Amino acid sequence: MPTKLTFIDQLGRKIVLDKYPSRIISVVPSQTELLFDLGLGERVAGVTKYCCHPASALQNSAVIGATKQLDLNLIRSLKPDLIIANKEENDREQIEELMQEFPVWVSDINDLSGSLQMIQAISELTCTTQTASNLIRRIEAGFSNLTTISKPLDVLYFIWRKPYMTAGTGTFIDHLLARCGLRNALLADRYPALSAEEIVNLNPAVIFLSSEPYPFKEKHIAEFRELLPDALIEIVDGELFSWYGSRLIYSPDYFNALITNIDKRLGVKK
């Protein structure tokens, strides 16, 4: 009887495969990019419409809907031997339905350690551990040289508008803010909506407007300046704050430049 391959996902669930997967569906953009960076592009059968990195993902793989609105029938037609999902980014009901028919490996990530564990685990699932080890070393080296802000500042990180939604505690974004030496002004868990009055009362020194999932632009800065005229307001790259796959290679250099710019605007000399 052939030997089965057994793995444990980040929810503690057992995943059993007959062989290393050759038809993978990724329903999480940052994990799609990771698969390609592990050299698995030819094995990726399906991706979501938000899987924009690399560009070839949308060009060469079937597009199976949005992260929370998957086309389950299309997924079934692709006959995947592995689906890679995420607890937060995907719809629980849809993922649980897919679990009844296919092996589904689910990540659950709130910090850098969880990200690196995910990268290692997916490499073991796909027999790409050597490539992953090099990737992990590069990410760890980058974060070991991370600049922190010169003095603690309270920050609000906005991910949505109408209603205003922010990244609270227990999120990957909150963890990366802390790695930069910034304090989250919001002590609420996950991604709460805030009224204009609540934003004013929190009185953060810094406001970050993320480029995703809501595409904040320079034109939105004035809107927040009316609420908090003394706050330092920045448009930031949402991918580098929230994508927890191989894109983390680029995050430390971006954070270093961002923190240096904030210190400069505050008149801090290093």
Image (cartoon, rainbow, N blue to C red):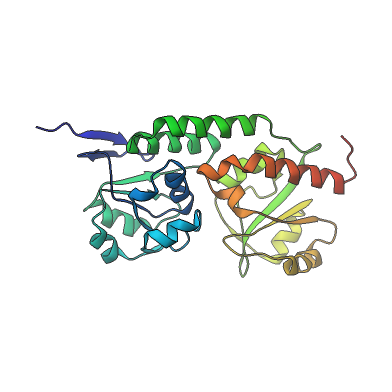
Closer-to-camera residue (142/14): 142
Left or right: where does residue 239 sit relative to residue 145? left
Residue 135 shows up from this direction: yes
Up-down: is 41 above or below 180?
Answer: below
Residue 61 percent coordinates (x, y): 37, 59
Residue 170 shows up from this direction: no
Residue 143 percent coordinates (x, y): 63, 33
Q: Residue at x 73, y 68 (%)?
A: 220
Q: Quadrant of the N terminus?
A: top left
Residue 59 appears in which quarter of the rendering? bottom left
Q: Residue at x 65, y 54 (%)?
A: 237
Closer-to-camera residue (37/14): 37
Closer-to-camera residue (102/160): 102
Q: Residue at x 36, y 55 (%)?
A: 92
Q: Residue furthest left?
A: 1
Residue 182 percent coordinates (x, y): 72, 42
Residue 256 appears in which quarter of the rendering? top right
Residue 108 percent coordinates (x, y): 44, 43
Left or right: where does residue 201 sit relative to residue 92? right
Q: Residue at x 49, y 35 (%)?
A: 116
Up-down: is 61 above or below 17?
Answer: below
Residue 216 appears in which quarter of the rendering? bottom right
Q: Quadrant of the C terminus?
A: top right
Up-down: is 47 above or below 180?
Answer: below
Left or right: where does residue 245 sit relative to residue 125? right
